[in-house]
Image (spheres, rainbow, N blue to C red):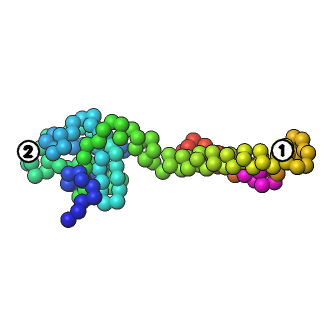
Amino acid sequence: MLTLFPGRECSISFRPSVAEGDAILTDQNTINAETGSKIFVQVGSKTYYVAVTATTKINNLINRDNVILHGSMVSAAPGRFRRVSETRYRLFKAMGTRKAKISLVAILLSIGLGTATSINASQHGASSAKPCTGFSCVTTPTWILMGFSAAAALFGWTKDNVL
């Protein structure tokens, strides 16, 4: 059997009393994660990058790989977990959310459309066969491209700044 996620198997419980983005592990977990460690948890198709905020004492080692995460209802599921570096944790927090991805796409779209606008303006602007001055040098397709660029920039800013 091929396991695509090479972390340790664990039992994951979701509790509303745990803050979102935090995890509670047992003090004798197999990845030796302590308070302050960053871990990667996978439950089915869901992925969580969380910080360990507390460890709990256990007597029965069969339960040593229990992970408690934030959730709306108390439930348990099998999953996998492993420690990750501080750099990977921060990179995920910066780019792992849907909001960050939408902003990045909007910014890249804005840059691409801005470049296309500049190229079109330089090819069809003041250097064209017919003489022109000011805004009359900018063709209709160039205005359309600039409008798309502005809309993409505004869309990215709105997605990044509106809760």
Amino acid under disc 2: Asn
Q: Most extreme residue toward the right, as rendered?
A: 131
- Is 137 rendered above or below residue 42? above
Camera-nearest label, 1 or 2: 1
Tag 1 secondary structure: loop
Q: Residue at x 14, y 47 (%)?
A: 64
Amino acid under disc 1: Ser
- Look at the image and tell me whether residue 112 can be seen: yes
The spot of residue 20 in percent (x, y) is: 36, 44
Q: For this view, does 152 lie left or right of residue 84?
A: right
The reply to whether the magenta stretch includes residue 12 is: no
For label 1, the crowd category at 10 Å Cα-Cα, with few meaning under 14, some 14 to 19 and many 20 or more, is: few
Q: Most extreme residue toward the top, as rendered?
A: 36
Residue 75 occupies quadrant? bottom left
**Res. 127 mark:** 1
For marks 1 and 2 on the same chain, the one whose residue lies earlier in the sequence: 2
The spot of residue 11 in percent (x, y) is: 21, 54
Q: Which residue is mark 2?
A: 59
Q: Residue at x 35, y 43 (%)?
A: 21
The spot of residue 74 in percent (x, y) is: 28, 55
Q: Which residues are magenta?
A: 140-145
Between the residue at mark 1 and the residue at mark 2, the CA separation in whole angstroms equals: 81 Å
Q: Do the residues under discs 1 and 2 have CB atoms within 8 angstroms?
A: no
- In front of the other: 5 or 68: 5
Q: Quadrant of the C terminus?
A: top right
Tag 2 secondary structure: loop
The spot of residue 138 in percent (x, y) is: 82, 47
Provide the major secondary structure of the magenta segment: helix
For label 2, the crowd category at 10 Å Cα-Cα, with few meaning under 14, some 14 to 19 and many 20 or more, is: few
Q: Residue at x 29, y 42 (%)?
A: 84
Q: Quadrant of the N terminus?
A: bottom left
- The mark total stands at 2
